[in-house]
Image (cartoon, rainbow, N blue to C red):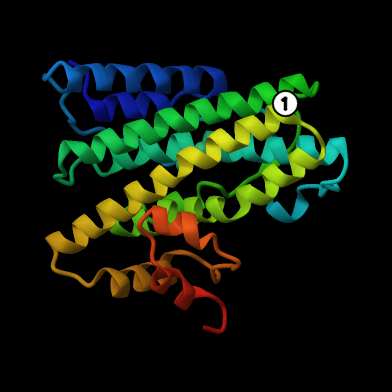
């Protein structure tokens, strides 16, 4: 019998982005059906790879070496969509990784519902961005992309609370801060397909940050810890560099992230 942890590892071990996202969506549907039918698939345990399988392309470069293109040009907008697609593909793996890597931590089934649902969203997001790239005459893999996207996962591989603090509550929350500016940029260029795709992504990412905050607070409650103090400590230890304002305070609030969590982590605070 398959287990959810084993299904997660299958996604992580799939290199081709189309095959990875298709499998991710199929596994999410399978999990959902098992929950709705009242016979949830066992969580089980499995050994996730240190790093997820990735395609030969895009070429992964040190962030310093990724060529910068002007956002005001068609080329620059393609580079931006490519960067978003790369983030989305990484996010698919991040959400399945939290399921597989921490399957031994006893958690309510709702925890798994949330991360399966987030992984399903990211798979759709990758597809939306890749469709935009195809419509613009490009594709995912056509440009170099940032290496080192997996660093946050490696940094937090042994501590579920650190993983939740750094990945959804810092990195995905950052997405809420920067996405409105990207949407405005594509709006000015009259690129309605990208505007629509990014608006869908923006709407759905709030939930991912909220899942992080919800389960972080759950674990603090389980261990009788002060959430704000622990959050600051874990982010300072596992996330390298200060948080960058301006923050999207409204969407962060929607996601259960109050200002006294992130403002003290700004440089010079
Ligand atoms: Fe996403
Ligand atoms: Fe996300």
Residue under numbered circle 1: 133
Q: Quick check: 132 above or below 103?
A: above
Q: From the viewer's perspective, is 187 left or right of 233? A: right
User: Which residue is pictured at 22% across the width and 18% down the height?
Assistant: 2
Q: From the viewer's perspective, is 153 left or right of 241? A: left
Residue at disc 1, secondary structure: helix
- Mark 1: C-beta under 8 Å from nearest atom of ligand 1: no
The image position of residue 38, as x and y in percent, is 11, 20
User: Which residue is pictured at 39% across the width and 53% down the height?
Assistant: 255
User: 245 or 183: nearer the eye?
Assistant: 183
The image position of residue 56, as x and y in percent, is 64, 27
Q: Is residue 33 visible?
A: yes
User: 158 or 206: nearer the eye?
Assistant: 206
Picture quarter with the N terminus: top left
Label 1: how many residues lie within 10 Å, few (<14), some (14-19) or many (20+)?
Answer: many
Q: Quick check: 25 above or below 9?
A: above
Q: Residue furthest bottom?
A: 268
User: 244 or 206: nearer the eye?
Assistant: 206
Question: How many labels sit on residues?
Answer: 1
Q: From the viewer's perspective, is 269 left or right of 56? A: left
């Amino acid at each position: 019998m398959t287990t959810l942890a084993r299904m997660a590892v299958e996604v992580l071990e799939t290199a081709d982005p189309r095959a990875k996202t298709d499998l991710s969506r199929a596994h999410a549907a399978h999990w959902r059906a098992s929950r709705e039918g009242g016979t949830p698939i066992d969580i089980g345990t499995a050994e996730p790879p240190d790093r997820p399988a990735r395609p030969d392309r895009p070429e992964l470069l040190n962030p310093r070496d990724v060529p910068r293109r002007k956002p005001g040009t068609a080329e620059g907008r393609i580079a931006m969509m490519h960067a978003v697609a790369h983030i989305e593909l990484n996010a698919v793996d991040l959400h399945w990784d939290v399921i597989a890597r921490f399957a031994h931590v006893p958690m309510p089934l709702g925890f798994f519902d949330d991360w399966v649902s987030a992984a399903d969203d990211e798979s759709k997001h990758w597809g939306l961005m890749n469709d935009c790239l195809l419509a613009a005459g490009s594709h995912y893999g056509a440009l170099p992309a940032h290496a080192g996207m997996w660093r946050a996962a490696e940094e937090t591989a042994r501590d579920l609370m650190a993983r939740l603090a750094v990945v959804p509550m810092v990195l995905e929350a950052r997405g809420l801060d920067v996405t409105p500016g990207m949407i405005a940029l594509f709006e000015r260029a009259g690129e309605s397909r990208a505007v629509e795709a990014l608006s869908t992504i923006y709407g759905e990412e709030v939930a991912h940050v909220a899942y992080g905050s919800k389960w972080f607070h759950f674990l603090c409650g389980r261990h009788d810890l002060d959430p704000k103090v622990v959050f600051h400590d874990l982010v300072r230890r596992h996330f390298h560099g200060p948080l960058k304002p301006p923050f999207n305070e409204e969407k962060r609030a929607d996601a259960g992230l109050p200002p006294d969590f992130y403002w003290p982590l700004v440089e010079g605070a």
